[in-house]
Amino acid sequence: MANKKTKLTLSGIAKKSIENIELAKTQSKNTVVIEKKTSRFVGKSSFNRPTDQSHKQQKKSFFSPKPTGFSKPQTPINNNFEKRKLAEQRATRRVKGELSTKDPKAKLGSKKRELKLTISRALNDEIETRSRSLASLKRAKQKENRDIKKKETQENFKPVKRNVNIPESITVRDLANRMAEQSSSLIKHLLGMGVTVTINQSLAADTAEYLVKEFGHHPIRESKAEEIIQKIKESRSENLKNRPPIVTVMGHVDHGKTSLLDVLRSANVVSGEFGGITQHIGAYQIEYNSNKLTFIDTPGHAAFTEMRARGSKLTDVVVLVVAADDGVKPQTIESIKHAKAAKVPIVVAINKCDLPEADPQKIKNQLLEHELIAEELSGDTLMIEISTKTKKNLDKLVESIVLQAEILDLKTDFESKATGIVLESKIDIGRGPVATVIITSGTLKKGDYFVSGLRWGKARAIIDDKSRNLDEATPSTPVEILGINGAAKSGDDFVVLNNEKEAKKLWETRVDESKQGKNPLTFATQESAFKDKISEELNIIVKSDVHGSSEAIKGAIEQITHEEVKPKIILSDIGMVTETDIALAKASNAVLIAFNVKPSKEAKKLAENEKIKISSYNIIYEVLDYIKKRMSGLLTPDVEETIIGSAQILEIFKVSGAGKVAGSKITEGEITSTADVRIIRDGVIIYTGKVGTLFREKNQVKQVSSGQECGITVKDYLDFQKNDTIEAFSVTSKERSI
């Protein structure tokens, strides 16, 4: 019995080696040898801890002989199951006793964990601590490496503090780019402050500065464009030299301003102007007795007010030309006001004194009303009687201008960077955008980078009034400059900077400032959205050769007013008529005006296909007359109604083929077969239509006169009643004009 080995099987226990089994045999006769075998018993009750009573019973039958034979298979299965449970319990108790003996303070885990340890110790006959698996060690090592790497990254990549330039207005997107931050972070931060913004919304400088500080960066407020330009103008040297005077010739239209300049510079400019009317600002420089003088010729037409105002602001001396045979006119008075506003001296040139009807004294007396007193009348205004035709007293006029310039003591710095004013601009075919500039201080050199209004560029070519290429332009010199990136606006300043970077930065600052305060979105109120349109609009597109003409035409058109129709200029630009202009005219149903320009071949072909009329003009009077004519076409014509006759219905008849016929008597006037009629019942108009047929004694007639009886049918009307009145009338419309 002792030598017989008893086998027990436990499911889920790790298989031990042969050496451990042999060692177990030699230690004790009651040692249990455990082998791995899949259990056929999976019920929960098989692993329940037995009670003390059942343990005693199992102990008695533990070493009972193993039954042989297979006649009753149920009994051996039960016996083996009981033996397996008993062996597990005895092994568990033994290991628990050893643990408590060796380490009474040892902490054991859950019953499941305790069971695994117990079996391991039963097989090895010693207390073992569970070793970590290779995968666990690998995971721990990876975690340690990640922690080290994260720590190193945090140390190496600390937040970078940046210097952020802040303009007066900046979008959320641009600010985030300058800070190298996410746009969503800025929006989220502002949202936390109760401010809802979009990525393209502009922020004020104060708000942008606050955000920069909140994100740990250093804000730098950018200077305004005007402040930058002011600093440039102030940085002048003390090497001041005398400069030629800038003289503006002003006066009423057709008083001889351009003719005077023609004689002085020995050129015929009048012939180059359409209709003999100056429509551009011309700038010339002449030399008289080693003295240089710069002349600016301004238009005299009422539409060119802005040009005259621009010339007066730029000038040092104003020459007021008044025709001796015409007298003081509205544009003459306006020129006087511009000159006084600019606080510049006035020299009066009384022209056309060679004519028989000339009366210079009358002119002097008229000028007294405007506080211009001649020297001979104890005043301080120089008045010279001249004639451009006979060249009378022209030298005296020039001497008077030079004298005024000497009194003014005009000096400026020749060595600094050039500044000036744009007189005119145009887009020349082959040369591109061209700006006419008068240099007010400094010296402009070929290759200089400059900013003019919202444009910038590089002076690639400098051309004087005689079409000569110059390497440099000194103060008071009128020149044409090539190299600007677009058509400049007349009256804009002209500033030269040190390099391309500075020029581009100043240009960008100006563009940003121009966008500030502009609201492209228009919000319609309930009242405006549902308000009836009172007046019609005539859409107009104007293309001209120079900016000054475009400006003048735009101003003159806007002054045309009417209660029922008004002009609306949707585009006013310079340059030839292009395909884009044709497409815009078609889309907006606009009038297309080409002033001193021609359409391109492509535009002309497209206009023919789309049936768009291009109205070309050379004189501003004709443009205004055409606009008034087109506006008159939009006016509602005057409608006049005349009553030609009336009839009283006496009886109603039914006639085959004609339906109901109103037997009537003409009470007034006459009724024709083509007349418009209205049916009146008890003083109320029931129906308005046309006469169908007129019957006179069963015969159709074209006309029935007063006092006669007839039968009348009305088209699309049969509901006649006795005593109804049929009234015939005629309608005439009369076209209206502005």
Image (cartoon, rainbow, N blue to C red):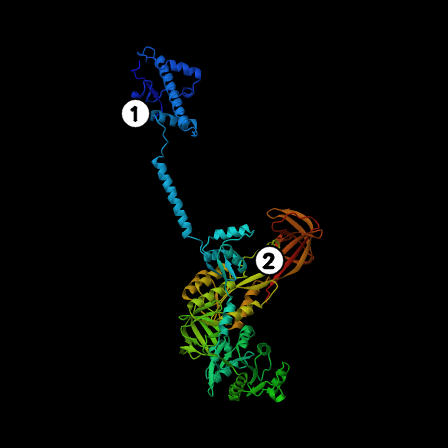
Task: Identify which residue is drawn at 34% across, 11% down.
Answer: 72
Tally the marks.
Answer: 2
Percent x, y for residue 348? 57, 84
Q: Secondary structure at mark 2?
A: loop
- Viewer-proximal residue among 438 and 659: 438
Instruction: State which quarter of the image contains the N terminus.
Output: top left
Task: Identify which residue is drawn at 30% across, 20% down.
Answer: 25
| Above or below, 285 relative to 637 | below
Residue holding disc 1: 20
Q: Amino acid at mark 2?
A: Lys
> How much space separates mark 2 and mark 1, taking CA atoms?
108 Å
Quadrant of res 108: top left
Residue holding disc 2: 533
Residue lying furthest front in this view?
101
Percent x, y for residue 342? 57, 77
Q: Is residue 486 visible?
A: no
